Image (spheres, rainbow, N blue to C red):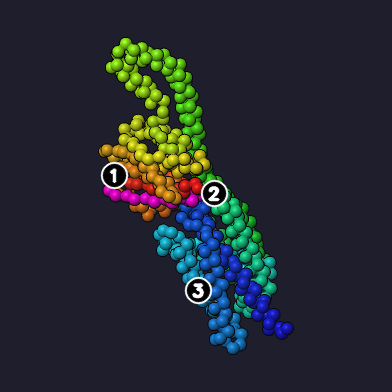
């Protein structure tokens, strides 16, 4: 085959690697937004397939270049065309992110496009400048790579390969290590600012030696500066700063997880205590029932009907006391409701329960705690600030779902969009450690293939939890 064919094939392969890096980087930004920024996004097949629009843009760009230029364009023209193509990819990424998120789409699209640009620029710059460094770091090397052979040759194949490998590796780490295992460590605003500063510094550092005037600093001088910056940067910026952010964020996430586990353990202990108490009361009732029935029979035989009727009424009261006060149809939910109802009684919050989930909800105890313990805690917190506080729990059954509605009194209307944005919204002053309860409710509900909805007005707030019924 002709040499021209192999040149085109080689260039096409480099372009394919670059496009692969863009595609994976776009998806990685989505995963980072879900796992570390608390954004509400679901990685679906449709979303993954839509990211391949980058390839379509690349193909269209290649066709246009072929039609516009009969011969291979010079480096300057190729550089401009490549810039236009890259710009088109970032425009497409904005549209991609616009449909990836389910709320505040424009804001999220802008945010993610900026992150996408920083992500790809960082990896590309790091790969390119590292290659320049190992090839000698001279002005001739820079001219040869970026002007004479821009986008072509084994050097660019190496840059594209390294960039693609690093990007894919980061995607795999975030996907398998966090998203798939449903580990969400929402990074707070202060840590995000620190991270942005870290990225900016780490992006600028490698370019400092290349920007030093060649007539004032020798190659050896620039190598020394490069080595010093890399040594300091990797140790301090590359290790210490990310570790600090991750450790601090993980600590807060573990506190949230421990809170759910403590609720679960408390519910289990409550169940054991109630079970033992009911066992003792049942044994006492069985011991006394024979004598009480004999006494009733004696009253009837002697014609004391009114006294016998009163005695039977007392016995029925004793039987009723053996039954649980709140019956939801699910044993674990009974315990959670009983615990929260006791708390509401102490806080003078009126609580009502209506409806039963026949056969139980069929959920894991931890999921039950994550959903209903958090939801009731939020309802109690909101109702406590009202003059006439109340919380109601309503359970209904449809053909396919159990619909559980938790309604509470409210002092003002709530911004539903902000509340369900999964970004840690809270009305409390301590925003660093609050505001993630409803986010946990939402994720746990979706993990159970359920649906979460909310309604609000000036006097009340209603959270509707729809859970599929077991066939």
Tell whether 457 sits left or right of 16.
Answer: left
What label does residue 97 carry, if any? none
Of marks 1 and 3, which one's residue comes earlier in the chain? 3
Find disc 2 in the rendering and name its residue. 183
Residue 324 in percent (x, y) is at 41, 30
Residue 205 in percent (x, y) is at 57, 62
Q: Residues within 10 Å of mark 2 (few under 14, many from 20)?
A: some
Tell whether 54 sits left or right of 455.
Answer: right
Q: In the rendered structure, does residue 119 fall within the stretch colored magenta?
A: no
Distance from the alpha carbon under mark 3 to that under mark 2: 34 Å
Find disc 1 in the rendering and name its residue. 411
Q: Which residues are magenta?
A: 443-458
Of marks 3 and 2, which one's residue comes earlier in the chain? 3
> Which residue in the rendered view is the most extreme toward the right?
1
Q: Are marks 1 and 3 in contact (CB under 8 Å)?
A: no
Find disc 3 in the rendering and name its residue. 88
Q: The N terminus appears in which quarter of the rendering?
A: bottom right
Closer mark to the observer between disc 3 and disc 2: 2
């Amino acid at each position: 085959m002709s040499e021209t064919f192999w040149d085109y094939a080689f260039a096409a392969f480099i372009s394919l690697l670059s496009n692969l890096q863009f595609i994976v980087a776009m998806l990685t930004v989505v995963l980072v937004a879900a796992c570390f920024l608390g954004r509400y996004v679901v990685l679906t097949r449709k979303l993954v397939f839509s990211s391949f629009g980058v390839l379509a843009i690349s193909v269209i760009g290649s066709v246009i270049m072929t039609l516009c230029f009969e011969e291979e364009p010079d480096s300057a023209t190729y550089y401009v065309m490549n810039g236009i193509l890259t710009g088109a990819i970032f425009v497409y990424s904005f549209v991609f992110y616009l449909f990836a998120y389910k709320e505040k789409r424009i804001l999220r699209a802008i945010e993610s496009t900026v992150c996408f640009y920083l992500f790809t620029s960082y990896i590309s710059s790091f790969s390119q400048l590292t290659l320049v460094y190992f090839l000698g770091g001279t002005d001739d090397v820079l001219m040869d790579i970026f002007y004479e052979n821009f986008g072509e040759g084994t050097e660019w194949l190496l840059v594209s390969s390294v960039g693609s490998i690093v990007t894919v590796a980061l995607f795999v780490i975030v996907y398998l290590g966090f998203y798939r295992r449903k580990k969400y460590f929402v990074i707070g605003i202060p840590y995000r600012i620190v991270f942005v500063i870290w990225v900016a510094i780490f992006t600028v550092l490698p370019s400092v030696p290349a920007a030093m005037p060649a007539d004032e600093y020798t190659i050896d001088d620039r190598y020394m500066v490069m080595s010093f910056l890399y040594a300091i940067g990797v140790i301090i910026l590359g290790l210490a700063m990310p570790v600090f952010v991750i450790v601090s964020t993980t600590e807060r996430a573990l506190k949230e997880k421990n809170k759910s586990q403590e609720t679960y353990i408390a519910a289990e202990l409550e169940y054991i205590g109630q079970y033992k108490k009911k066992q003792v009361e049942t044994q006492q009732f069985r011991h006394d029932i024979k004598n009480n029935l004999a006494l009733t029979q004696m009253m009837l035989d002697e014609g004391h009907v009114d006294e016998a009727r009163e005695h039977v009424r007392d016995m029925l009261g004793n039987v009723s006391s053996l039954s649980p006060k709140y019956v939801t149809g699910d044993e674990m939910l009974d315990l959670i409701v009983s615990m929260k109802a006791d708390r509401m009684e102490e806080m003078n919050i009126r609580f009502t329960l209506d409806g039963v989930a026949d056969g139980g909800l069929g959920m894991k105890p931890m999921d039950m705690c994550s959903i209903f313990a958090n939801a009731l805690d939020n309802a109690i917190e909101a109702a406590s600030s009202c003059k006439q506080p109340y919380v109601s729990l309503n359970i209904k059954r449809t053909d396919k779902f159990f619909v559980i509605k938790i309604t509470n009194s409210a002092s003002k209307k709530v911004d539903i969009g902000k509340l369900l944005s999964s970004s840690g919204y809270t009305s409390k002053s301590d925003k660093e450690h609050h505001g993630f309860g409803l986010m946990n409710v939402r994720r746990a509900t979706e993990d159970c293939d359920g649906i979460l909805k909310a309604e609000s007005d000036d006097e009340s707030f209603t959270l509707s939890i729809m859970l599929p019924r077991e066939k």
